[in-house]
Amino acid sequence: MAKQSGQKLKLLVLSRILTEETDEDHPLTATQLAEKLAEEGIPAERKSIYSDLDALTEAGYDIVNTKRGYFLASDRFESAEVMTLADAVLASRFLTDKKSRILIDKLGGLLNRYQRTHLRSSLRAGSRKKGENESVLYSLDAIRRAKSEGKWVAFRYFEWAPSFSGQGKFVRHHRHGGEEYLVAVKGILWVEDNAYLVGYDNRHQQIRNYRVDRMDRVSVSERPVGIIKELDFDLSDYADKLFGMFSGKEERVTLCFPNSLANAAVDYFGADAFLSPDDRPDRFRITAPVALSPRFYGWVLGFGGQVELLSPESAREELRRQAEEAGKVHQKV
């Protein structure tokens, strides 16, 4: 019995050594594996290693035999995949710097020791401003659970406001005096590095959007949602129409772009947007429904006159008005 238990322990330690110590660039011979086991207090003959490796292979381990030795092929994530995930975590604006580092350390646990060293040396702190809400991941989890369980998600919602008592700084200001919001979850939208809860707001009796990083005390209510007809819509279409999460009257607009801005047009309207030729060969037109909001007009103006809003005329007039108002603000004093 003792011998059998020792053999099981031997296989467990051997699998850990292969996971931690080997990859395509760092294979280990049978002799080296036996030496590693000895360092763990488990004596093993070189010849017995071969049968151990066969047993692990039969158990599902992808062990590769090369001229230089054995290594365990990745059965979870490849190093490049983990590095890509770590880069995305570091660049995510809604995550705090502390939470980003914790997640990256956990991702490093998917790698062997050589790859972890490469991960730490390759990552550099970005220059982007990170989030301020440490509980955002738990808020996202509560939102998903509320949807899965068919219950309302409860939370308080805050905005940032300037405060000049002492040293000037931004402070949290809760809407409605900190009263609790109840929302029936439709889903989560990711827009410009921010996560938004989309759902039916019980207070306003309509579909609303809330920045997840501005939610706190997020919990799953015990109240079941039931049937809410307002939740019967396509979330992707809804996101496209809102055009950046800012509400406004929906209109079908036509814009004219230079060919050089095709990438920008695809980013916002998608590659399957309805195109039509313009009179000029170096330009094209797109017709699509959008929410006529300050965000939309600001996006058009941001191209410095390269994009023309052709119709409807009411939207053209509003675009001119907003451009004039911006000009007045920046006139010389």
Image (cartoon, helix red, strand yellow):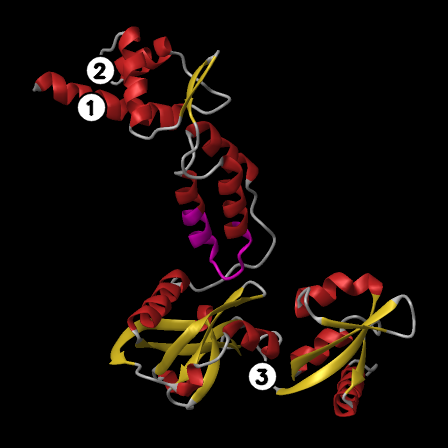
* Residue labelled with disc 2: 42
Q: Position of residue 44 (x, y in %)?
A: 25, 10
In which quadrant of the rendered image does the C terminus lie? bottom right
Q: Any magenta on residue 92?
A: yes
Most prominent secondary structure in the magenta stretch?
Answer: helix
**Mark number displayed over residue 34:** none
Q: Position of residue 39 (x, y in %)?
A: 28, 15
Badge 1 crowding class, 10 Å Cα cut-off, few under 14, some 14 to 19, many 20 or more, is few
Q: Position of residue 26 (x, y in %)?
A: 47, 20
**Mark number displayed over residue 247:** 3
Real-space Cα separation, disc 3 to disc 2, in angstroms: 67 Å
Farthest left residue in view? 1
Please report the bounds of the magenta region as a residue range. Answer: 90-103
- Is residue 206 placed above or below 161 in the rendered structure? below
Q: Position of residue 126 (x, y in %)?
A: 58, 50
* Residue labelled with disc 1: 9
Q: Please state which amino acid type lies under the numbered disc 1.
A: Leu
Q: Is residue 266 left or right of residue 166?
A: right
Q: Please state which amino acid type lies under the numbered disc 3.
A: Ser
Tell me which numbered mark, 1 or 2, is placed earlier along the sequence.
Answer: 1
Residue at horizontal 49 percent and vertical 78 percent from the top: 209
Tell me which numbered mark, 3 or 2, is placed earlier along the sequence.
Answer: 2
**Which structural element holds mark 3?**
loop
Farthest right residue in view? 280
Badge 2 crowding class, 10 Å Cα cut-off, few under 14, some 14 to 19, many 20 or more, is some
Real-space Cα separation, disc 1 to disc 3, in angstroms: 61 Å
Residue 106: name its quadrant: top left
Of circles 1 and 2, which is in front? 1
**Which structural element holds mark 1?**
helix
Residue 280: name its quadrant: bottom right
